[in-house]
């Protein structure tokens, strides 16, 4: 379960930012996470509540926006949805090219 290890850094960053800005509480943490990270939102929510207990973030709400994995064809530049678990989606639906780059879905950031 990599959600716990990831969430440790998120809680630490939220608390550090709040303290640097003289805040007395963290109310919300907004994340943007790409599908390629394969994060289970419910597990991350639970880890966040556990790790934030007894801190200024104890009542904070964790908001997770998932970003769809999309690929760009290296031949025709078409951008299309991809699924790492379905190899049939890992080739261009227009020209059939299998040389692709990730267009979106790698994101992992605290937005605010």
Image (spheres, rainbow, N blue to C red):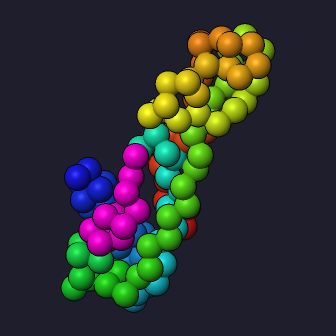
Question: Visible in this render: residue 10?
Answer: no
> What residue span does the magenta drawing correspond to?
38-48
* Residue 61 vertical position relative to residue 30 in the rendered view, above or below: below
From the viewer's side, name the closer residue of 87 and 7: 87
Q: Quadrant of residue 47?
A: bottom left
**Residue 43 on the magenta segment:** yes
Main SS of the magenta part reads helix
From the viewer's side, name the closer residue of 8 and 36: 36
* Residue at (59, 12) in percent of width and height: 99
* Residue at (31, 64) in percent of width and height: 43
Q: Is residue 75 left or right of residue 69?
A: right
* Residue 4: % across, % down: 24, 59
* Residue 63: % across, % down: 50, 70
* Residue at (58, 28) in percent of width and height: 89
Number of dots carrying numbers: 0
From the viewer's side, name the closer residue of 108 and 16: 108
* Residue 93: % across, % down: 71, 22
Q: Quadrant of the C terminus?
A: bottom right
* Residue 29: % across, % down: 47, 72
* Residue 95 vertical position relative to residue 60 in the rendered view, above or below: above
Q: Quadrant of residue 59?
A: bottom left
Q: Is residue 91 left or right of residue 80?
A: left
**Residue 93 on the magenta segment:** no
């Amino acid at each position: 379960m990599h959600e716990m290890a990831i969430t440790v850094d998120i809680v630490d960053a939220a608390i550090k930012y709040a303290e640097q800005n003289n805040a007395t509480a963290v109310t919300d943490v907004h994340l943007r996470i790409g599908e390629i990270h394969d994060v289970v939102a419910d597990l991350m929510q639970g880890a966040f509540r556990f790790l934030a207990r007894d801190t200024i973030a104890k009542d904070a709400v964790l908001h997770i926006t998932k970003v769809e994995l999309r690929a760009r064809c290296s031949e025709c530049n078409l951008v299309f949805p991809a699924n790492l678990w379905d190899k049939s989606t890992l080739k261009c639906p227009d020209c059939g090219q299998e040389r692709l780059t990730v267009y979106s879905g790698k994101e992992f950031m605290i937005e605010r």
